[in-house]
Image (spheres, grey):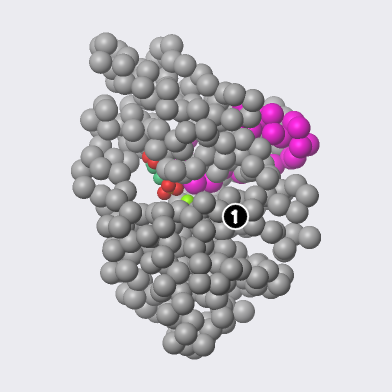
Amino acid sequence: MICLGIESTAHTFGVGIADEKGNILSDEKDTYKSKEGWGIIPIESAEHHREVADSLIQKALAAASLEMKDIDLISFSQGPGLAPCLYAGLNKTMELSRNFSIPYIGVNHCVAHIEIGKIYAEQKDPVVVFTSGANTQIISFNNGRYRIFGETMDVGLGNALDKFGRSAGIGFPAGPKIEELGRSGKWIELPYVVKGMDLSFSGIVTEASKRLEKGCRLEDVCFSIQESMFSMVTEVTERAIAHLGKEEVMLTGGVAANRFLQEKLRIMSEERKARFSACPMKLAGDNGAMIAWTGILAHKSGYKSEKGKILPRWRADDMEISWMK
Ligand code: AMP
Ligand code: MG
């Protein structure tokens, strides 16, 4: 079985093709870029997705040496995400399905991040640290679902770093720049906010920006904002492993690129005798391949998605994981 997957939840339009062993036959993407200093403008991003869709589908087919008639299933990211962007993906999916008489299925974007990570970070049953621009969640499989054991109560970790980056004038996305600057920084006191298993980042961003205004070195603030936020994520992850008795920790999402975060999680995992690995970077950000692979898992296990509909607020734990029964 060969599946073509379409990702369109936020700024990335991705088209990936996967087979039923999880091999990725092709994976193409194009990302909407907002005006300097602005975040994603949903209708502009959706317009971008509509403009690039056909050429990316052709590119993905060509890279896999396939034609539409070779495709057995189309899957798309049904949510969570920005409604106009999700519609761009749904409409393209339904158009292809109609024109080529191929069945389609909707899958959960966060679940897809986990499933592609399990293959390519080589883990079976991990505690997943999923941290992207918009999301930060500690997730693990338990009793038929991917349960969310801890999460941010306000912004995602990536967006928090980007927000600080905007106030510091270091450009977008700020994550990589903050990592680089932080290497030569020293600790200054910043808040640390863990409530039970949940996290809050926005107060730390405000405080870090104030430190800069008061004349603290940018390098020190960059070091400390990471030290504080990543320690919070590590604390909650450690508690999840201990509580669930899991033996693997997997990091994914765009912030997985950060060496400093990887190192903290690795050390904690080793101390807990758990195996740590990060999803390879080209699959850690939003991509079509993860949607294609999850489409195959869902379809083969008899999962039925809602037709002709997007689910902008669909949580990972609201999807039935029929392939892990
Ligand atoms: P995603 O939403 O999964 O596409 O991830 C994008 C987010 O990852 C942005 O908020 C970036 O600032 C963040 N990011 C990318 N590279 C790094 C890095 N090296 N350190 C911290 N954050 C990063
Ligand atoms: Mg994502």
The location of residue 294, given as percent across then percent down, is: 60, 64
The location of residue 14, given as percent across then percent down, is: 41, 64
Residue 236 belongs to magenta span: yes
The location of residue 321, given as percent across then percent down, is: 70, 59
x 41%, y 72%: residue: 91
Tell me: residue 123, above or below residue 136.
Answer: below
x 74%, y 31%: residue: 242
Quadrant that contains the N terminus: bottom right
The location of residue 324, given as percent across then percent down, is: 74, 59
Q: What is the tally of numbered marks visible in this picture?
A: 1
Q: Amino acid at mark 1?
A: Val
Q: Which residue is mark 1?
A: 111
Residue 20 belongs to magenta span: no
Tell me: residue 71, above or below residue 256.
Answer: below
x 63%, y 29%: residue: 197
Dominant SS type (magenta): helix
User: Label 1: how many residues lie within 10 Å, few (<14), some (14-19) or many (20+)?
Assistant: many
Quadrant that contains the C terminus: bottom right
Tell me: residue 154, above or below residue 192.
Answer: below
Q: Is residue 184 visible?
A: no
Q: Nearer the viewer, residue 70 or 144?
A: 144
Disc 1: residue Cβ within 8 A of ligand 2's nearest atom? no
Disc 1 on helix, strand or loop?
helix
Q: Is residue 304 visible?
A: yes
Res. 199 image quadrant: top right
Question: Range of the magenta residues?
Answer: 235-259
